[in-house]
Amino acid sequence: MKVLVTGGTGFLGRHLVPDLQRSGAEVTVINSRNCDLTDRQNLRQFQDMQFDRIYHLAAWTKAGDFCLYHKGEQWIINQQINTNVLWFWREFQPKAVLIAMGTGCAYPPEMILREENYMAGEPDRDLYTYAMTKRMLYSGQLALNHQYGMSYRHLIPSTLFGPKFDRGDSHFIFDLIKKIVAGKTTGAPVALWGNGQQIRELIYVDDAVKLIHLATEHCPNDLLNLGSGQGATIREYAEMICDIVGYDPARIIYDTTKFTGVSKKVFNTDKIKRLFDFQFTSIRQGLEETIRYYRSLPQ
């Protein structure tokens, strides 16, 4: 099997690519250094290669308040990336399955985060631009499937965590780990954004990879949430990390002046539970592995 992976050196890619290679796949990896996806001509270097699958992981975004200050850039850059990948798929790889990653922030925050609501209403205003580029990506997959019969999957993972994350990754769970480990090391207080009551769902990255494979094999032309449907507050995650590293959670300061996002983001997982009998890695175990990795990095 021949596979193309965009964004293959990002966090998810660093887990998905080796897993595909272990399964015997011949994997071609695209990243920002070897192929600028904002220019479709750069994709022509792969036009004579015939792929069975294209995993589209690439996106121009960051966690935290990044989306608040880069709305115009996010619209232009992500629309270029997604449109060019869809063009390449239609023009040169019509027999390939396009497996694209969506985003939970595309859901209207006031509605149940169920697949049927992915395109309903409006996304959270702070994340609106990035969310809409993902909706447009899904629209493109639907359109090409409708007109040309091309095969797709649009998969929406909850917040990924696990080893192999970058030091600069600011997703909330990595931010908690870095700050609390630093507090343990230096003895200093830890400041976290918000009041700690925001509820978030996590998925261990190895679980996400397994579910991507299952969905690719068994969910033709479908939209699917990847998650357990179980959430916890930021404060609860912080306290669990404190327990693992041996830091007093009473020393954490919650800064309510900082950006916090929506109050709750937990998927409805009725659909995936109907499809698969899947055992998720416990959050505690996943955090222990993630913290062990982080502590193993050169300081």
Image (cartoon, rainbow, N blue to C red):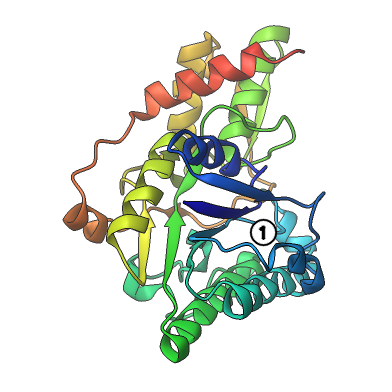
Could you tell me residue 116's position as x and y percent?
A: 33, 75
The foreground one among 201 and 292 is 292
Q: Secondary structure at mark 1?
A: loop
Could you tell me residue 210's position as x and y percent?
A: 37, 42
Q: Work out whether 136 lies above or below 13.
A: below
Q: Quadrant of residue 23 in the image?
A: top left
Q: Which residue is mark 1?
A: 59
Question: Looking at the figure, which quarter contains the C terminus?
Answer: top right
The foreground one among 171 and 25 is 25
Q: Work out whether 287 lies above or below 213.
A: above
Label count reads: 1
The answer to whether any part of residue 218 appears in the image is yes
Could you tell me residue 100's position as x and y percent?
A: 51, 63
Callout 1: few (<14), some (14-19), or many (20+) C-alpha neighbours within 10 Å?
many
Question: Farthest residue in the bottom direction?
Answer: 147
Residue occupying the point 69% across, 47% down: 257
Residue occupying the point 74% across, 74% down: 80
The answer to whether any part of residue 250 appears in the image is no
Could you tell me residue 296's position as x and y percent?
A: 64, 12
Q: Work out whether 68 lies above or below 200.
A: below
Q: Is residue 234 left or right of residue 58?
A: left
Residue occupying the point 81% across, 60% down: 36
Q: Is residue 235 left or right of residue 184?
A: left
Q: Work out whether 176 lies above or below 44.
A: above
The kind of residue tagged 1 is Ala
Residue occupying the point 59% across, 75% down: 132
